[in-house]
């Protein structure tokens, strides 16, 4: 990592930068850190799939894009106070190891909601209007085949949302003008009354799968959701239904979904997330014409990265000024004497618990 001269040293992982040391993205919110007199900004010199402990030497906070953070990464973390995950998924970070190492982990809660919701709605329209196939018809001079691909509207269709956090709620709100039927929601952690207040109906997962025209996944990947959608669950879906995954690979059993799509037991799918990312050779999905694919970036926009970056940078600023950041995943770390001592050394204002 580059050397620092400031009070609180924040490093970004190397995958934010190109080979010339320039950021790959137009705006990742760094102006917030750069205008703060007590913070020095640097970057990790190399990208590794897993951050090495030696890379974190001298850093007090790290903003992480795609690299994994493990117990080994945190082996020498006496000066490291915070990991800021650039996004809302944190399955790539060992949360328990962060707590043991007296490191707070926070995500950029809320910053991704609009962009992922907009991408979800865009995919719903693309699937029902056969955008991919109709584009191919023109490119291949098959104009007269167009009558074989009649689309359908969102009007009167039912959306099923799995996971009713900020993204799921943003999707529901964005679709309010399309004349769809009452949305269905499966989320055992959200009270049915709260779901009803949003204009949706709380149901079991099986009910949702059987009654929805679109099943859209917006839950985190954890021990409870891994392989949540498998052969049995897919068999409950309507032959005219679509599955959308903008959440995480691993929530869906991929072999089961591939077989289901190959046999056209559901109408189609849109997948932004896969097991074993990154996919660096053509995957089996490329054989299918009823699936839309994206390299875990369908929601990537300049606005998204700006908002995520501002949120991540603000989290680091909050810590230097004695405040808890938004989106903390391991709040129990604030009660640990080791964390409190470390935080006391590094913040510029009295700690506010």
Image (cartoon, rainbow, N blue to C red):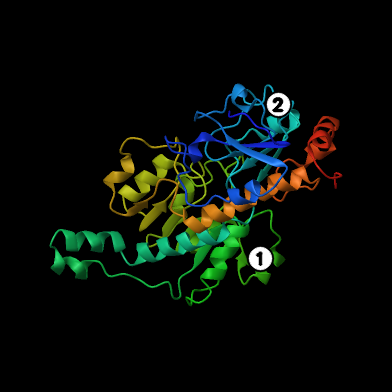
Q: In front here: 237 or 160?
A: 160
Contact flag, marks 1 and 2 (Cβ < 8 Å): no
Secondary element at tag 1? helix
Q: In front here: 183 or 10?
A: 10
Q: What residue is pinned by disc 1? A: 195
Quadrant of the image for the N terminus?
top right
Residue 242 appears at what percent x and percent y?
41, 59
Location of residue 175 with respect to 90 vertically, above or below: below
User: For the residues marked 1 and 2, what is the alpha-carbon distance in whole angstroms?
Assistant: 41 Å
Q: Is residue 108 visible?
A: no
Q: Quadrant of residue 97?
A: top right
Numbered disc in front, either 1 or 2: 2
Which label was assigned to residue 85?
A: none
Q: In front here: 233 or 193?
A: 193
- Neighbourhood count class around disc 1 (C-alpha, 10 Å): few under 14, some 14–19, many 20 upward: many
Location of residue 187 with respect to 346 vertically, above or below: below
* Residue at image point 36% right, 62% down: 127
Residue 309 appears at what percent x and percent y?
58, 50
Q: What residue is pinned by disc 2? A: 77
Q: Is residue 314 left or right of residue 178?
A: right
Location of residue 45 with respect to 172 vertically, above or below: above
């Amino acid at each position: 990592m580059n050397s620092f001269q400031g009070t609180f040293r924040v490093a970004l992982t190397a995958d934010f930068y190109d080979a010339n040391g320039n950021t790959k993205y137009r705006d990742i919110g760094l102006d917030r850190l750069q205008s703060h007199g007590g913070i020095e900004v640097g970057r990790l010199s190399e990208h590794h799939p897993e951050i090495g402990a030696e890379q974190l030497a001298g850093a007090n906070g790290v903003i992480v894009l795609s690299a994994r953070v493990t117990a080994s990464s945190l082996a020498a973390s006496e000066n490291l106070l915070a990991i800021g995950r650039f996004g809302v998924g944190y399955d790539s970070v060992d949360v328990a190891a962060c707590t043991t190492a007296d490191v707070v982990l926070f995500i950029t809660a809320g910053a991704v909601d609009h962009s992922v919701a907009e991408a979800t709605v865009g995919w719903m329209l693309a699937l029902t209007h056969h955008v991919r196939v109709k584009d191919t018809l023109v490119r291949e001079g098959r104009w007269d085949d167009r009558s074989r691909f009649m689309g359908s509207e969102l009007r009167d269709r039912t959306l099923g949302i799995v996971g009713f956090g900020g993204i799921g709620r943003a999707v529901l709100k964005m679709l309010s003008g399309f004349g769809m039927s009452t949305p269905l929601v499966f989320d055992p952690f959200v009270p049915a009354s709260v779901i009803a207040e949003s204009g949706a109906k709380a149901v079991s997962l099986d009910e949702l799968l059987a009654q929805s025209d679109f099943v859209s996944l917006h839950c985190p990947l954890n021990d409870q959701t891994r392989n949540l959608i498998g052969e049995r669950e897919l068999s409950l879906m309507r032959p005219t239904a679509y599955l959308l995954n903008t959440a995480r690979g691993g929530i869906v059993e991929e072999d089961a979904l591939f077989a289901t799509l190959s046999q056209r037991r559901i109408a189609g799918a849109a997948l932004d997330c896969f097991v074993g990312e990154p996919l660096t050779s053509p995957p089996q999905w490329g054989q299918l014409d009823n699936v839309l694919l994206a390299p875990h970036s369908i929601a990537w926009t300049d606005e998204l990265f700006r908002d995520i970056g501002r949120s991540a940078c603000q989290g680091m600023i909050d810590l230097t000024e004695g405040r808890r950041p938004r989106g903390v995943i391991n709040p129990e770390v604030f009660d640990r004497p080791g964390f409190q001592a470390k935080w006391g050394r590094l913040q510029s204002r009295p700690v506010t618990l």
